[in-house]
Amino acid sequence: MDRRIEVALKVIHQEIERNIPVRELAQQVRLSTGHFIRLFKAETSMSPKQYVRCLRMKQAETLMYASFLSVKEIAACLGVGDRSHFSRDFKKFHGRTPTSSRYRIESPPE
């Protein structure tokens, strides 16, 4: 994987709760925004925004099982201020609402 994308991924993972503009990530790895997006997509098969959303939804599911935080608190921890937006993204990604995910009888994700 391209080292510049590795650096960007590290920043994304370390600052997942912050809404980092794509332009800022591109500047950190010294690429134009357009070139950064193309390279990021070539390396990860997702745009930077899609990657961040995917990462947040995976972490949200883990927090549903591993904590007693409310859906609103989990959304805030992951940098999503609007609960309804968070719930909509969660359902789109997991196929169920955050609340129904929390009360599922199935075992937690690994």
Image (cartoon, rainbow, N blue to C red):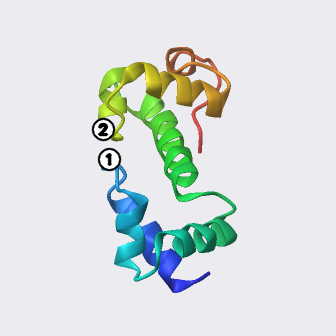
Spot occupied by residue 7 in the image (x, y as percentages of width and height): 43, 76
Side of 63 relative to 94 (left or right): left
Q: Nearer the viewer, residue 47 or 79?
A: 47
In screen coordinates, is 108 left or right of 8?
A: right
Q: Is disc 1 in contact with disc 2, using a CB cutoff of under 8 Å?
A: yes
Residue 107 visible in the snapshot: yes
Q: In the image, what residue type sits under mark 1?
A: Glu
Q: What element carries label 2?
A: helix
Q: Position of residue 27 (x, y in %)?
A: 36, 75
Q: Quadrant of the N terminus?
A: bottom right
Q: Which residue is drawn at 56% across and 75% down?
A: 35
**What is the CA distance from the residue labelled 1 to the residue labelled 2?**
6 Å
Q: Residues within 10 Å of mark 1 (few under 14, many from 20)?
A: some
Q: Which mark is residue 87?
A: none
Can you identify the residue that label 1 sits on?
Answer: 17
* Label 2 environment density (alpha carbons within 10 Å; few <14, some 14–19, many ≥20): some
Query: Label 2 sits on what residue type?
Result: Cys
> Disc 1 or 2, which lies upstream in sequence?
1
- Residue located 59% across and 57% down the image: 47
User: In the figure, 24 relative to 96: above or below?
Assistant: below
Image coords of residue 100 (percent x, y): 56, 14
Residue matched to label 2: 77
Numbered disc 1: secondary structure? loop
- Left or right, 14 with respect to 7, comes to left
